[in-house]
Amino acid sequence: MVIGKATFAAGCFWGVEATFQSVEGVLETEVGYMGGHTESPTYREVCTDRTGHAEVVQVTFDDSQVSYARLLEVFFRSHDPTQRNRQGPDVGTQYRSAIFYHDQRQREEAEAYRKELGASGRYRRPIVTSIEPAGTFWRAEEYHQKYLQRKGLTSCRL
């Protein structure tokens, strides 16, 4: 078993986490914050849209069961990557579409996948998903972890 880490931002982290929990080969998911400039940010601080952090899901996966390319596919299918700093009713930089890569291979795969998807004609608008180096992962407060699962829900959609 080869354990990998992947970190994605695609709007509110509750729904993104639920999406990745259902992927075979995903061993663990945690929600938190990445990509900002404040040390140990809280949910309340991140929601002010002043810390620079995105709401992220950090995925621990078995690379022998699920490829990083498959995780990229799940990521792009789970949200609208053409919306800048928002997903649905959630607006702000904390809801941006971003891939935080953990090594050069992930960076190259993410860039190639985004380019291929952009050229595919699937979207009418350009893909705005950023590809950034993974920084410190600040784990969100406990009540955010597995939120939808604990509430007996499978998605945030009404």
Image: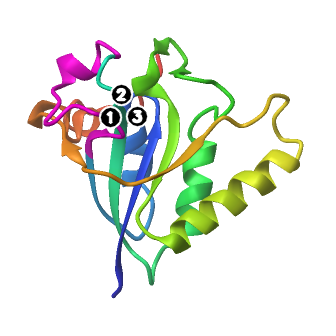
Distance between mark 1 and mark 3 Cα atoms: 21 Å
Asked whether 9 falls inside the magenta stretch, the response is no
Q: Quadrant of residue 56?
A: top left
Give the percent coordinates (x, y) of residue 114.
70, 52
Q: Amino acid at mark 1?
A: Gly
> In this orientation, which residue lies closer to the viewer: 32 or 155?
32
The residue carrying mark 3 is 15
The residue carrying mark 2 is 52
Asked whether 37 falls inside the magenta stretch, the response is yes
Q: Secondary structure at mark 3?
A: helix
Q: Residues within 10 Å of mark 2 (few under 14, many from 20)?
A: some
Residue for point 50% across, 30% down: 96
Q: Is 137 left or right of 112, judged from the image as shown? A: left
Q: Mark 1 or mark 3: which comes first in sequence? A: 3
Contact, CB < 8 Å: mark 1 with mark 2? yes
The quarter of the image holding the N terminus is bottom left
Distance between mark 1 and mark 2 Cα atoms: 4 Å
Q: Secondary structure at mark 2?
A: loop
Q: Amino acid at mark 3?
A: Gly
Which disc number belongs to residue 27?
none
Q: Amino acid at mark 2?
A: Gly
Give the percent coordinates (x, y) of residue 80.
64, 31
Look at the image and give the residue range highlighted in magenta: 31-49
The residue carrying mark 1 is 36
Determine if residue 64 is in view. yes
Q: Secondary structure at mark 1?
A: loop
Residue for point 61% across, 40% down: 129
- From what the image shows, is residue 124 above or below residue 69? above
- From what the image shows, is residue 74 above or below residue 42? below
Q: Residue furthest bottom?
A: 1
